[in-house]
Image: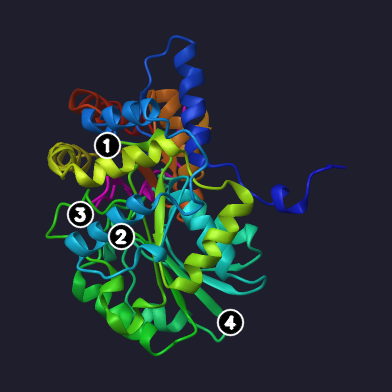
Amino acid sequence: MSALSTRINNLSESATIKMAKLGRELAAKGVDVISLSFGEPDFHTPEHIKEAAKQAMDKNFTYYTPVSGYPDLRKAVVAKLKNENNLDYDFSQIVVSTGAKQAIANAVLCLVNPGEEVIIPTPYWVSYSEVVKLAEGKSVFINTTVEQNFKISPEQLEAAITPNTKLFMFSSPCNPTGSVYSKDELEGLAKVFEKHPHVYILSDEIYEHINFIDKHESIAQFDYIKDRVVIINGWSKAFAMTGWRIGYTASNSEIAAACDKMQGQITSGTCSITQRAGVAAYEGGLESVLEMRAAFKKRRDIVYKLLSDVEGVKVNLPDGAFYFFPNVTSFFGKSYNGRTIKDADELSIYLLEEGHVATVGGDSFGDPSSIRISYAAAEDKLIEAVRRIKEALGKLK
Ligand SMILES: Cc1ncc(COP(=O)(O)O)c(C=O)c1O
């Protein structure tokens, strides 16, 4: 019998991390694998941010920090929320954490009681349903399809809310679909929330800057629900700072104090040096961010054109983030070399072993009909990867 708790035994391993591991194992055997499984920009952190970190060490920013982060960092977040999003927060409402991942865990653990329902549109980012499990909440899924651009309607939301609903969690721009909700679409959802004052909203905006349409819209802009919205954001995707581990929540004061208390018992404030780099990133302007965004848009267009040409793959044009989430159900039941594809996870393994391209099966994103393809890779690699995918899929009869 396992000595481990039911809590950890019930938790799933991250599928994205698992696929990256399988890809690396194959590469270690000398196979030329193209990895499109990871969710991180393939750019380096901009120089002025790295420089700020070096100076931080020289200036001895090496001690424990306030649990929620240095006050000037939180003030920089407040200024960003005002200038870029026209949202008003006090710096005491900002809790800086060890990545947006911890910010999400803090918020869910602080809000959800055992047995309470958390509504999550599918497909969703892999950790959402797992952190709900840790809180002993109950995930309630709203299914979306590629035909509806993977966005829920106000009617679907209304139908999912019960007296036992505590939280609604979503990302826009979305990982894994790249879908972006427009202001009108968010307003449609906000009006539903207005009628249900017991429901809180976790709005994950980590891909804010990787948005190929208009400007970013936050659901917190609707004053009548703002107090119930917890914004999640961070530096990982916008500033190519995945390894630095820094993200934040912006919320009402009660939730902020709770997240501070939670974090104070688990990790304390995130790395002092990283926090100084975070200030430099926010004070340094968006030039590097815009360059990355332009590169992502170019790649998106290339991959969209190529993928649209692969028979049996149903794909939509994502408006943000750096993922495609094509429907691959037409390959289920088909075989090659004595191997029959049952589902998207198996197709993803097939693509790795037969085509030497690492993707991620949709199951862990709550949608077993699709696979996730990250296009955070160089253009020549992307072109070659789609060629290999097309060839491998073409063998399935
Ligand atoms: C939707 C979404 N939210 C949050 C995160 C976590 O970001 P961080 O690196 O800041 O923990 C990710 C990372 O992949 C993500 O895709």
Question: Crowding near pointer 2: few (<14 within 10 Å), some, many (20+)?
Answer: many
* Among the 4 quarters of the image, the one containing residue 239: top left
Q: How is the image coloured?
A: rainbow
Cβ–Cβ under 8 Å for marks 1 and 4: no
Question: Contact (CB < 8 A) between labels 2 and 3?
Answer: no
Mark 4 or mark 2: name the one nearer the start of the chain: 4
Q: Residue at x 32, y 53 (%)?
A: 177
Q: Going by the image, does 79 lie left or right of 243?
A: left
Q: Main secondary structure of the magenta part?
A: loop
- Name the amino acid type tagged 1: Tyr
The residue pinned by badge 4 equals 164
- Residue 38, placed above or below residue 10: above
Where, quadrant-wise, is the N terminus in this rendering?
top right
Q: Position of residue 384 (x, y in %)?
A: 24, 24
Q: CA distance from mark 2 to mark 3?
A: 10 Å
Q: Disc 4 vs disc 3: which is toward the camera?
A: 4
- The tag earlier along the polypeptide, 3 or 1, is 3
Residue 340 visible somewhere in the drawing = no
Q: Separation of disc 2 and disc 1 at Cα?
A: 18 Å
- The numbered disc on residue 172 is 2
Q: Nearer the viewer, mark 1 or mark 4?
A: 4
Circle 1 residue:
375
Q: Which residues are magenta?
A: 311-337
Q: Residue furthest bottom?
A: 195
C-beta proximity under 8 Å, tags 4 and 2: no
- The answer to which of marks 4 and 3 sits earlier in the sequence is 4
10 Å crowding of disc 3: few (<14), some (14-19), many (20+): many
